[in-house]
């Protein structure tokens, strides 16, 4: 197994088809792809035959908070072949994504939401929950927040700044707007 990555727009057609089929299988009715304004990057775990066993997307955008604008990245569309779940393939890909983001000097933090039962999965890769933090995505006219009725989301993050503890404190317990203008899945 090896990890490979592409800008979403440059993903070879054969691999893009596999990702689309995998996402549709796990999330019937889902729409492939992300808003190009988020500079999506696709990371894949592929086997020796070139079969995609797991995939995720990295999305990038500035996030203003208080008197600072953070250069943020988020994980989205994290998925693994259902029949291969359990031996850590998805975890391996998420850990590789975190390593890539930590090494990128243009990224201050990784910030996204996940279903509550997945917190330990992301925690194993070094992402920590931000208690009370709410991400607000969607659009200004149609916002979607991680604390919306019916959601059971937790915001998790990893900080790659000179003061990760201070920045984590700044993000804990606040509402973080992820728009304006972009309609995309919540990270």
Image: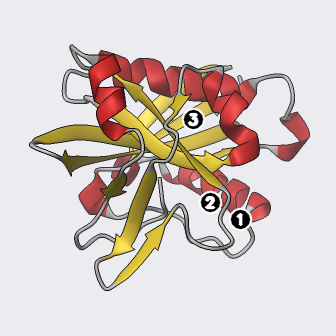
Where residue 103 sits in the image (x, y, percent)? Answer: 31, 16
Q: How crowded is mark 2: few (under 14 residues within 10 Å), some or many (20 or more)?
A: some
The residue that mark 2 highlights is: 20
- Location of the N terminus by quadrant is top right
Q: How far apart are marks 1 and 3 (CA)?
A: 16 Å
Horizontal side, residue 9 vs residue 150: left or right: left
Where residue 17 sits in the image (x, y, percent)? Answer: 61, 57
Q: Nearer the N terminus, badge 1 or badge 3?
A: 1
User: Is residue 179 or residue 167 the one in the foreground?
Assistant: 167
Question: Which disc, if any, is residue 157?
Answer: none
Q: Residue at x 61, y 20 (%)?
A: 2
Q: Residue furthest bottom?
A: 141
User: Is residue 64 or residue 73 the one in the foreground?
Assistant: 64
Whether residue 56 is situated above or below residue 34 in the rendered picture: above
Q: Quadrant of residue 52?
A: top right
C-beta proximity under 8 Å, tags 2 and 1: yes
The residue that mark 1 highlights is: 24
The residue that mark 3 highlights is: 44
Whether residue 150 is situated above or below residue 97 in the rendered picture: below
Q: How far apart are marks 2 and 1 (CA)?
A: 6 Å
Where residue 81 sits in the image (x, y, percent)? Answer: 79, 43
Q: How far apart are marks 3 and 2 (CA)?
A: 12 Å
C-beta proximity under 8 Å, tags 3 and 2: no
């Amino acid at each position: 197994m090896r990890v490979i990555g592409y800008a979403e727009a440059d993903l070879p057609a054969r691999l893009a088809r596999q990702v689309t089929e995998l996402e549709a299988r796990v999330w019937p009715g889902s729409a492939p792809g992300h808003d190009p304004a988020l500079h999506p990057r696709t990371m894949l775990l592929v086997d020796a035959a070139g079969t995609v066993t797991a995939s995720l997307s990295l999305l990038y955008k500035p996030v203003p908070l208080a008197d600072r604008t953070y250069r943020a990245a988020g994980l989205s569309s994290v998925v693994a072949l259902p029949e291969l779940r359990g031996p850590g393939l998805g975890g391996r890909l998420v850990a590789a994504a975190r390593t890539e983001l930590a090494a990128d000097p243009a990224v201050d933090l990784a910030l996204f939401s996940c279903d509550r039962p997945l917190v330990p999965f992301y925690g194993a890769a070094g992402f920590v929950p931000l208690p009370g933090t709410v991400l607000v995505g969607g659009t200004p006219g149609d916002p979607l927040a991680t604390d919306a009725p019916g959601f059971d989301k937790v915001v998790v993050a990893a900080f790659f700044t000179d003061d990760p503890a201070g920045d984590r404190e700044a993000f804990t317990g606040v509402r973080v707007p992820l728009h304006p203008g972009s309609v995309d899945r919540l990270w």
